């Protein structure tokens, strides 16, 4: 699920920040992004932690879980956009909320795209590349 | 000289023709009068002449053969211009007649005297006498001629009236026979003397079949009384009576007729009663139908009003022509609003919302318009606007607030459930994919397998909880109640969380004083609730913390079980959310701890099904205390838990009760235990037991009270075993008895005798006879 903004973002991905409050999902997604995508991965377990990490490590992409206690995904996105140093980092939502109406809402919030849980760890990096308008690497 | 015409000639001719006398045969009544005139006046000729348009025609004539003459030559044409009698002593001397053909040639009239025939104000002709010699009449003769003229006029008037009467009668008969109303005439003995066409048509009889019918042949049983009462009223002088009655069509169908009756008397004696009816069967059915619809509209929750536009040129000229109660209630209007008021007067907001424009459009297009989620006040309405005939529109207003809220909650629930299911699935799916890829190191692989396992458990728990909750919410959760020991419940729950507590480094203590004892409840479900509370307490307690569980009697009667943790506490504003579905106060915490977010919702439902309450108290210093109260005695849907016969054991001595219960258990009986009369009665009211074993002396009453209560709850013939401290006399035995009853004396009965008595009684009662008891 891509957005018009994606075409302008051609910068190759090296470092990904993953913000998710579910430890198991962080573990699985990290393995996928690292082993399948070949990217460097940093993680955060909450919105505020993720924002701080984004400022520090300036990732090429931020994956944000939508449903997190306290500071949820959309709030985190808003704060990232508000700060100049993180405003231009592409953000993709990952969510277990999968109703059409909800997905449309998430896209309207300004995310590059939405990845629906459960995702295939072997396809996740390609899914991200497609959203960002990068040519997907052929598997195998 | 030709006579001029009378001033009212047209009306006079109409009156003449209306008599119907012209060109009719001679009649003795007139001829006699003409002859009298000739005789009295001593003239050779006498005539009764009617002056028509162009002739005079003789109704009666004496002395001449002609039946008529032209009006031009008629003396009578002159006579009818006079107010009195016209006398012409000598026609040759009278310029009006000197050249008259009747004078100059045969019959050469010289004398004429004609008295006018005045009928209904018109002079229709004369009775006249003529002679061929000049002469005079004596005053007596003149007066006689006048008198004869009056007699002739009276005869004419009589005939005119008779003709009129006959005509009227014919019309009436025609009306009666062919009327759309049903006409019947009934003799005093109930025979039908006359029925008209409509009557026969409506009730299905031919004219021949209607002959010989009696009223009772055509009236439904329930209306006979109506007729009897009506006859009584009429016979005793009431001028007219109204009646609505059920008649029977020849084929048996019921026909409702409504009408009036009058009674005919002859010489003061009633001879017949005539009825005129209308068939109101359809009307009554219509009225009932309309009434049903009206009731429906009045009673339905949907508000309805109907507006009619007075003036197409005035866009705001909609007036209220109909409304039900609900519209007033829904829109919070004065209940007594008057029909006929303008929209602006009844409900100004109608104008504010620009409704009349929409109403115009609905009327113009003839299609219904629906507005969903129409906000008014703090509610949301569904509004249907539909066209009606006669410049009207109908507006149906339904309060959709609740439905919309339910829809929203349903959607939210689905969204949440979807989220909750997808989250563990993500870990499982991810773990499997990564394992399959072969990209992981052995350590990573082992971790990943653990993740998959953990999340599978979480998924299973979640699904079980969702199914449980569904069962509870749809009212399908059936408690399997029996007498359960609270100590056992608490110990079982603690055993279940023991390893989780050890993992979390939390100690759990339990205190259940013996006074708490047992109560009737679903033991497994209580264990589930307590396990859930303990698991939560362990999860939220810090490592090294302490979770305390205890049970206690509460003053109101019943038992409270509490679980206190040393967790961070819950803000007061958030506490009400705790027992909702997926209402974690902190989603991350719950998920980290492996909860489904449904446990407290399920616990609340279980406790409430036990008529109990569940709640939480928190303080920042001492953590949270979750507790639930269970009232005793209670047993709403008690079912025997093991499938054996159900025995109500009423005994206040706890140790004796326990021994007896154990003995009963050895023969497969399920025991419901009561220590007081009140408990026994409460159990008996909610459970049908197969046998009651009753100690006759109890702390709050004696066995007689229990027996009386058992009789009241329909156990008059149930088996009963009474054991008493002393021997009973026969009166006491009679009082302490239900159906098959055995009496034992405590001090002289062995255990074996008690069991034998129980076996005997369980084998005697009808429902319990089916129990196969081990010996």
Image: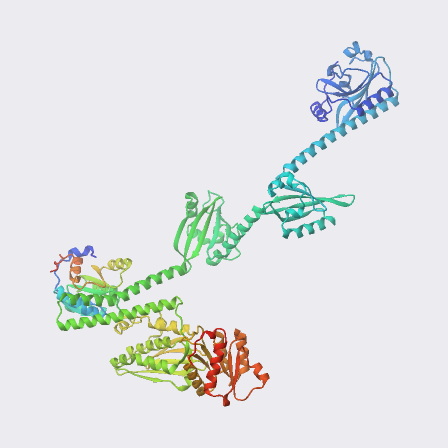
Pick the residue in front: A2 or B360: A2
- Describe residue B579's horizontal placement relative to residue B348 as left or right: left
Task: Tell me, yes or no, if residue B680 can be seen here.
Answer: yes
**Residue B461, percent across and down?**
29, 71
Indicate the quadrant where residue B549 lies.
Answer: bottom left
The C terminus of chain B is located in which quarter?
bottom left
In the picture shown, does residue B48 fall above or below B538?
Answer: above
- Describe residue B451's horizontal placement relative to residue B415 as left or right: left
Residue at 46% over, 42% down: B313
Outermost residue, top side = B105
**Residue B532, percent across and down?**
33, 76
Pick the residue in front: B689 or B20: B689
**Residue B300, percent across and down?**
48, 56
Indicate the quadrant where residue A21 lies.
Answer: bottom left
Residue at 43% over, 84% down: B663
Pick the residue in front: B495 or B735: B735
Pick the residue in front: B99 or B575: B575
- Describe residue B223's horizontal placement relative to residue B655 as left or right: right
The N terminus of chain B is located in which quarter?
top right
In the picture shown, does residue B771 fall above or below A2?
Answer: below
Q: How many marks?
A: 0
Outermost residue, front side = B775
**Residue A109, percent across and down?**
25, 60
- According to the image, what is the colour scheme of the structure? rainbow
In the picture shown, does residue A40 fall above or below B666?
Answer: above
Task: Tell me, yes or no, if residue A55 can be seen here.
Answer: no
């Amino acid at each position: 699920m891509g957005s018009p903004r994606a075409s302008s973002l051609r910068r190759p991905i090296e470092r990904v920040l993953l913000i998710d409050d579910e430890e198991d999902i962080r573990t699985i997604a990290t393995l996928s992004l690292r082993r399948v995508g070949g990217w460097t991965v940093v993680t955060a377990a909450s919105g505020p932690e993720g924002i701080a990490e984004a400022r520090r490590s300036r990732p090429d992409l931020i994956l944000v879980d939508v449903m997190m206690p306290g500071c949820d995904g959309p709030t985190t996105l808003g704060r990232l956009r508000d700060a100049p140093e993180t405003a231009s980092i592409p953000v993709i939502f990952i969510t277990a909320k999968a109703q059409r109406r909800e997905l449309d809402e998430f896209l309207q919030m300004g995310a590059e795209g939405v990845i629906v849980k459960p995702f295939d760890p072997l396809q996740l990096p390609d899914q991200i590349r497609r959203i960002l308008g990068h040519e997907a690497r052929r598997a195998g | 000289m030709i006579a001029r015409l009378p001033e009212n000639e047209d009306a006079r001719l109409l009156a003449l023709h209306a008599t119907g006398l012209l060109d009719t045969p001679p009649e003795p009544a007139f001829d006699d009068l003409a002859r009298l005139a000739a005789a009295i006046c001593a003239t050779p000729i006498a005539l009764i002449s009617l002056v028509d348009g162009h002739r005079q025609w003789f109704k009666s004539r004496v002395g001449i053969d002609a039946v008529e003459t032209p009006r031009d030559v008629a003396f009578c044409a002159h006579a009818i211009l006079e107010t009195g009698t016209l006398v012409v002593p000598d026609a040759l001397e009278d310029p009006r007649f000197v050249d008259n053909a009747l004078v100059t040639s045969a019959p050469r009239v010289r004398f004429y005297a004609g008295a006018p025939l005045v009928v209904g104000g018109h002079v229709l002709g004369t009775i006249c006498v003529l002679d061929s010699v000049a002469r005079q009449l004596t005053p007596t003769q003149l007066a006689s001629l006048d008198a004869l003229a009056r007699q002739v006029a009276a005869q004419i008037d009589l005939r005119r009236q008779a003709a009129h009467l006959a005509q009227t009668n014919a019309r009436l008969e025609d009306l009666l026979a062919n009327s759309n109303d049903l006409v019947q005439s009934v003799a005093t003995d109930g025979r039908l003397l006359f029925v008209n066409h409509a009557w026969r048509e409506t009730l299905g009889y031919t004219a021949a079949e209607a002959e010989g019918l009696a009223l009772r042949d055509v009236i439904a049983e329930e209306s006979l009384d109506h007729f009897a009462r009506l006859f009584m009223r009429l016979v005793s002088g009431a001028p007219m009576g109204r009646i609505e009655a059920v008649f029977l069509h020849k084929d048996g169908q019921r026909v409702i007729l409504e009408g009036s009756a009058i009674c005919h008397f002859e010489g003061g004696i009633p001879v017949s009663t005539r009825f005129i009816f209308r068939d109101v069967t359809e009307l009554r059915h219509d009225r009932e139908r309309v009434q049903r619809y009206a009731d429906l509209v009045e009673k339905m929750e949907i508000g309805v009003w109907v507006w009619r536009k007075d003036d197409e040129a005035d866009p705001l000229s909609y007036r209220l022509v109909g409304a039900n109660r609900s519209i007033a209630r829904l829109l919070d209007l004065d209940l007594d609003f008057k029909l006929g008021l303008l929209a602006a007067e009844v409900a100004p907001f109608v104008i504010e919302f620009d409704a009349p424009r929409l109403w115009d459009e609905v009327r113009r297009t003839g299609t219904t318009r629906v507005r969903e989620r129409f906000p008014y006040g703090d509610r949301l309405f569904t509004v249907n606007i539909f066209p009606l005939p006669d410049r009207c529109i109908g507006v149906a207003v339904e309060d959709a607030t609740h439905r919309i809220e339910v829809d929203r909650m349903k959607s939210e629930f689905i969204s949440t459930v979807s989220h909750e299911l997808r989250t563990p699935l993500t870990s499982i799916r991810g773990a499997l994919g990564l394992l399959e890829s072969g990209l992981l190191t052995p350590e990573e692989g082992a971790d990943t397998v653990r993740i998959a396992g953990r999340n599978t458990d979480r998924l299973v728990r979640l699904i079980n909880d969702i199914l449980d909750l569904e069962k509870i919410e749809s009212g399908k959760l059936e408690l399997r109640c029996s007498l359960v020991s609270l100590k056992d419940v608490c110990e079982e729950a603690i055993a279940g969380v023991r390893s989780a507590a050890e993992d979390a480094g939390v100690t759990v203590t339990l205190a259940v004083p013996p006074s708490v004892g047992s109560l009737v409840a679903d033991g497994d479900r209580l264990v589930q609730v307590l396990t859930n509370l303990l698991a939560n307490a362990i999860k939220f307690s810090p490592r090294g913390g302490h979770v305390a569980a205890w049970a206690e009697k509460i003053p109101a009667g019943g038992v409270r079980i509490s679980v206190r943790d040393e967790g961070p506490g819950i803000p007061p504003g958030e506490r009400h959310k705790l027992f909702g579905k997926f209402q974690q106060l902190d989603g991350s915490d719950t998920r980290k701890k492996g909860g489904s977010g449904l446990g407290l919702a399920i616990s609340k439902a279980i406790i409430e099904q036990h008529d109990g309450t569940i709640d939480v108290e928190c303080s920042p210093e001492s953590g949270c205390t979750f507790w639930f109260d269970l009232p005793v005695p209670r047993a709403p849907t008690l079912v025997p838990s093991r499938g054996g016969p159900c025995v109500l054991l009423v005994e206040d001595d706890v140790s004796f009760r326990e021994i007896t219960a154990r003995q009963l258990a050895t023969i497969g009986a399920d025991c419901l235990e009561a220590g007081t009369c009140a408990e026994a009665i409460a159990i008996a009211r909610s459970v049908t037991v197969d046998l009651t074993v009753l100690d006759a002396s109890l702390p709050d009453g004696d066995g007689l009270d229990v027996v009386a209560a058992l009789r009241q709850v329909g156990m008059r013939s149930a088996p009963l075993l009474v054991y008493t401290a002393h021997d009973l006399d026969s009166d006491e035995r009679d009082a302490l008895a239900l159906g098959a009853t055995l009496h034992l004396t405590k001090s002289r009965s062995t255990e074996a005798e008690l069991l034998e008595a129980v076996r005997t009684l369980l084998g005697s009662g009808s429902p319990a006879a089916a129990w196969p008891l081990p010996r």
